[in-house]
Amino acid sequence: MKIPNGTWVFFGNVPHEATSADVQAFLLEAGIDVGPERISMRNHEGDFRASAVISLPGSEVASLVARAIYERPLMGRVLRVSCPGMPKSS
């Protein structure tokens, strides 16, 4: 699936059973309304993790989104979040 142009926010450590609808609901709980056309999921074969990428219209927006959901669990797992302009966690 090709997602629209924009600044990408990457989510790692996503539960394998999570769907794009789960990610969308997770974001909405944080007050972030992202349409399904802006979410791309990938399951890693042979692993119990997946990843997700969302595309947003600007690096400042993406950074705010990443900070709003930083360390919030999805289905019991804390996600790794990264995007341009977001400081690396230590």
Image: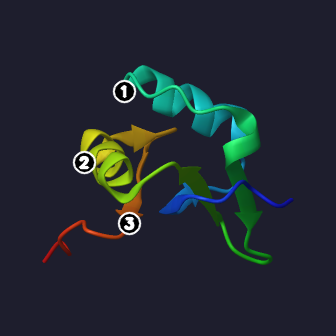
Q: Position of residue 40 (x, y in %)?
A: 72, 55
Query: Nearer the N terminus, badge 1 or badge 3?
Result: 1
Is the C-beta separation of discs 1 and 3 under 8 Å?
no
Q: Residue at x 73, y 36 (%)?
A: 36
Q: CA distance from mark 3 to mark 2?
A: 10 Å
Q: Tell which of 38 and 80 is nearer to you.
A: 38
The label on residue 67 is 2
User: Which amino acid type corresponds to the residue marked 3 in the rendered image?
Assistant: Cys
Which residue corresponds to mark 3? 83
Which residue corresponds to mark 1? 30
Q: Tell which of 79 and 39 is nearer to you.
A: 39
Quadrant containing the N terminus in the rendered view: bottom right
| Mark 2 crowdedness (10 Å alpha carbons): few <14, some 14-19, many ≥20 | some
Quadrant containing the C terminus in the rendered view: bottom left
Q: Position of residue 70 (x, y in %)?
A: 27, 49
Q: Residue at x 30, y 52 (%)?
A: 60
Query: Nearer the N terminus, badge 2 or badge 1?
Result: 1
Q: Visible in this render: residue 30?
A: yes
